[in-house]
Amino acid sequence: YAPHAESTSRHIENADPSSSLSKGLKLYTEKKYELAIEMFDMALELAPNDERALFFWGITQIELGNRADALKHFQQYHG
């Protein structure tokens, strides 16, 4: 996992990983993939081992056409 959104660290103090994940999933279903990635990044900064956030981060990267990033991410996650 490597965060891609520079602004996420500014919001960490008041953030909740499940809230960020929920927002990311909503954005994903709306096909707002760039914004979804930011929410998944935030969720992962708060809870680095959250399997749902890890999974949807990778799936969203695939939707954005970033298959190499997604593959690298999944390989890191699964060891």
Image (tube, rainbow, N blue to C red):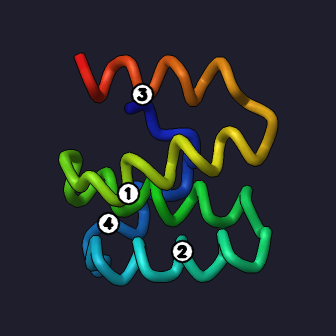
Query: Residue sitting at 23 percent across and 16 percent down?
Result: 79
- Examine the image and state in which quarter residue 17 appears: bottom left
Q: Which residue is tagged 2? A: 25
Query: Residue sitting at 40 percent across and 55 percent down?
Result: 9
**Could you say whether the residue bearing mark 3 is in a helix, strand or loop?**
helix
Marks 1/4: CA–CA distance = 16 Å
Marks 2/1: CA–CA distance = 9 Å
Side of 38 relative to 65 (left or right): left
* The disc label shown at residue 74, or none: 3
Q: Which residue is tagged 1? A: 53
Say which label, 1 or 4, has the lower sequence index.
Answer: 4
Relative image position of residue 34 (x, y in whole percent) = 73, 57
Say which label, 2 or 1, has the lower sequence index.
Answer: 2
Q: Nearer the viewer, mark 4 or mark 3?
A: 3
Kind of residue at badge 4? Ile
Name the one closer to the observer, 52 or 9: 52
Name the one closer to the observer, 14 or 60: 60
Marks 3/1: CA–CA distance = 12 Å
Q: Which residue is tagged 4? A: 12
Side of 42 relative to 70 (left or right): left
**Could you say whether the residue bearing mark 1 is in a helix, strand or loop?**
helix
**Could you say whether the residue bearing mark 4 is in a helix, strand or loop?**
helix
**C-beta proximity under 8 Å, tags 1 and 4:** no
* The disc label shown at residue 19, or none: none
Q: Is residue 55 above or below residue 21?
A: above
Say which label, 3 or 1, has the lower sequence index.
Answer: 1
**C-beta proximity under 8 Å, tags 4 and 3:** no
Say which label, 3 or 2, has the lower sequence index.
Answer: 2
Kind of residue at badge 2? Leu
- Examine the image and state in which quarter residue 78 appears: top left
Marks 4/3: CA–CA distance = 24 Å
